[in-house]
Image (cartoon, rainbow, N blue to C red):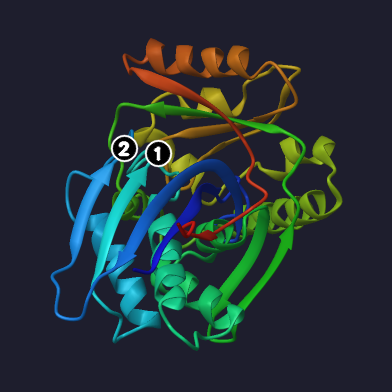
């Protein structure tokens, strides 16, 4: 039997002013243990891990991605072990699409090239920042549109990520609906300036520029009403903090820190608590590796 294991990291997108363009990979993984079954067998799916899916949404993402790459893929037995919080703005759907593309490519004798696989993940996910952070790891700046997929990857920053995950629901589609259809020119200029600065800071490793570079006027102010305490968190004054931003569409909040991650996490969690919201703190390294495929050891 052909057996292999595929994993993909969580991710945090936007980083404030990098809306729909910037993503970082986080060392927290969704892992699929895959076994190719005999022709005609029924697929088998099982779920484990701290955040095992409670419905078929993640499975659907993975199966759509497999079908995109390998329409005639053989039946599979998949044990999905998920450590990524679902619906928390940590790229669980991007990780699922990355897993599916990697699985589809692995079961083909002649898979499409790496660029085609990366584009498939980005198009399926719809957000190239999350998608390519899950696919490549590291720090991603990406654009997807009528001119195709263009991306630059940089090494993971020399910081730790503190994620505060509140016990509130905020679906991506709901978070998008909170944003206006048009913006004042001053706000657009503000974000163009900060997004350019953000790209330069990430490319050069200039941590000192990030606090200013993540300041956003396009999405975070409009989502703040759905994430109580967000405005206060974005202004958190702590010497360890490099940057604070809403993680993806939320509701989780991301802080990049030089040190003292637990202190920073507790300060952010305390803000949620003052608004009557329970939250939990994750302290994670940034992930230098994206999708990983490992063949099962042969006896």
Residue found at x 35% / y 45%? 81
Q: Is residue 24 above or below residue 146?
A: above
Depth check: give the residue in front, 243 or 46: 46
User: Residue 207 appears in which quarter of the rendering?
Assistant: top right
Q: Quick check: marks 1 and 2 in contact, CB under 8 Å? A: yes
Instruction: Assess disc 1: are there few (<14), some (14-19) or many (≥20) residues with their C-alpha within 10 Å of its C-alpha.
Output: some
Secondary structure category for the residue under label 1: loop
Residue found at x 41% / y 69%? 103
Mark 1 to mark 2 CA distance (whole Å): 5 Å
Residue found at x 60% / y 80%? 115
Residue found at x 59% / y 78%? 114
Q: Is residue 76 above or below residue 8?
A: below
Q: Position of residue 255 (x, y in %)?
A: 61, 30
The residue that mark 1 highlights is: 83
The residue that mark 2 highlights is: 51
Q: Position of residue 53 (x, y in %)?
A: 24, 45
Q: Is residue 187 left or right of residue 73?
A: right
Q: Is residue 235 above or below residue 182?
A: above
Depth check: give the residue in front, 295 or 92: 295
Q: Position of residue 228 (x, y in %)?
A: 39, 26
Q: Is residue 88 above or below residue 277?
A: below
Q: Outermost residue toward the front?
A: 299
């Amino acid at each position: 039997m052909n057996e292999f294991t595929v994993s993909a990291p969580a991710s945090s997108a936007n980083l404030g002013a990098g809306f729909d363009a910037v993503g970082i990979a986080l060392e927290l993984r969704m892992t699929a243990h895959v076994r190719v079954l005999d022709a005609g067998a029924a697929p088998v799916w099982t779920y484990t891990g701290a955040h095992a899916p409670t419905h078929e949404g993640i499975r659907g993402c993975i199966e759509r991605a497999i079908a995109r790459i390998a329409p005639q893929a053989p039946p599979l037995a998949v044990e999905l072990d998920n450590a990524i919080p679902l619906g928390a703005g940590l790229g669980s759907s991007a990780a699922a699409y990355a897993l599916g593309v990697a699985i589809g490519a692995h079961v083909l004798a002649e898979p499409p090239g790496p660029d085609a696989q990366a584009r498939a993940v980005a198009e399926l996910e719809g957000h190239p920042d999350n998608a390519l952070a899950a696919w490549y790891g590291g720090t991603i700046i990406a654009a997807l549109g009528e001119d195709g997929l263009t991306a630059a990857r940089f090494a993971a920053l020399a910081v730790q990520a503190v994620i505060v995950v509140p016990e509130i629901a905020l679906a991506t589609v709901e978070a998008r609906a909170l944003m206006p259809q048009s913006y004042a020119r001053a706000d657009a200029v503000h974000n163009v300036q900060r997004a350019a600065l953000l790209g330069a800071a990430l490319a050069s490793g200039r941590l000192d520029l990030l606090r200013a570079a993540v300041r956003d006027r396009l999405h975070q102010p409009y989502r703040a009403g759905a994430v109580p305490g967000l405005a206060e968190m974005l202004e958190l004054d702590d010497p360890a903090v490099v940057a604070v931003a809403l993680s993806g569409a939320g509701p989780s909040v991301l802080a990049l820190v030089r040190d003292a991650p637990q202190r920073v996490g507790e300060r952010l969690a305390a803000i949620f608590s003052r608004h009557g919201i329970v939250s939990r703190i994750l302290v994670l390294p940034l992930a230098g590796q994206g999708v990983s495929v490992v063949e099962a050891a042969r006896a």
